[in-house]
Image: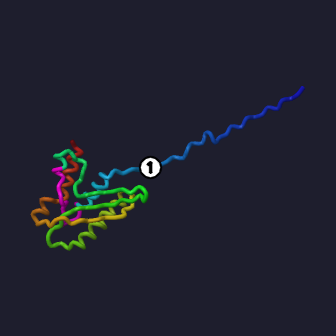
Amino acid sequence: MSEKKMESHKIDTGEFDLPETIYSRDIENRVFQEIIIKTLSRISGIGLAEGRFLDSLIGRPDKIKGIYTQQDPTTQSLKVKIEIGIQYGISIPQKAEEIQSAVVEDLIKMSGVRVSEVHVVFKQILSEEESEQESLPEAICGIEEEFEE
């Protein structure tokens, strides 16, 4: 009698290996804009150059006027443009450096995204009264009200 050897079938365990997990993270431009507004609110002597009231009237409440961000997926970096008013008598070069440093620090700390450019455009001179009326903390309150609706 011929003895048949029982062959053990080996199972390819490669079929059971789980694929590598891909981690991804997307951050909407609105998040970057809100970080920038909160950063600017801590800096004295400035205000957003244009309000957002008109945008909300014509149906664009998701726009933050005067703060623009653009993500570059190829370099995984962020470009920022901020249009602001500055109180009369304040040094523009010094204030620009203060704004740029604070914005870059907060964006990197909170998002981990590399900031490749911060372009500050001074669009108007604010009087003391305008500076108080156009204060950034009030602009932040406007943003928070939108989310409460």
* Quarter placement of the C terminus: top left
Residue type marked 1? Ser
Residue sticking out furthest to the top: 1
Residue sticking out furthest to the left: 129
* Display colour scheme: rainbow
Asked whether residue 6 is drawn in magenta, I would say no
* Quarter placement of the N terminus: top right
Where is residue 125 drawn, in percent x and y?
A: 15, 67
Question: How many marks are shown on the rendered structure?
Answer: 1
Where is residue 108 drawn, in percent x and y?
A: 36, 61
Whether residue 59 sits left or right of residue 115 in the image: it is left
Q: What stretch is highlighted in magenta?
A: 41-54
Residue at x 22%, y 47% (from the top left corner): 61
Q: How crowded is mark 1: few (under 14 residues within 10 Å), some or many (20 or more)?
A: few
**Above or below 92: residue 20:** above
Circle 1 residue: 24
The quarter holding residue 93 reads bottom left
Residue sticking out furthest to the right: 1
**Above or below 4: residue 134:** below
Asked whether residue 49 is drawn in magenta, I would say yes
Residue at x 11%, y 62% (from the top left corner): 130
Residue nearest the viewer, comparing 78 with 140: 78
Residue at x 17%, y 57% (from the top left corner): 50
Element type at marker 1? loop
Where is residue 66 drawn, in percent x and y?
A: 23, 58
The quarter holding residue 148 reads top left
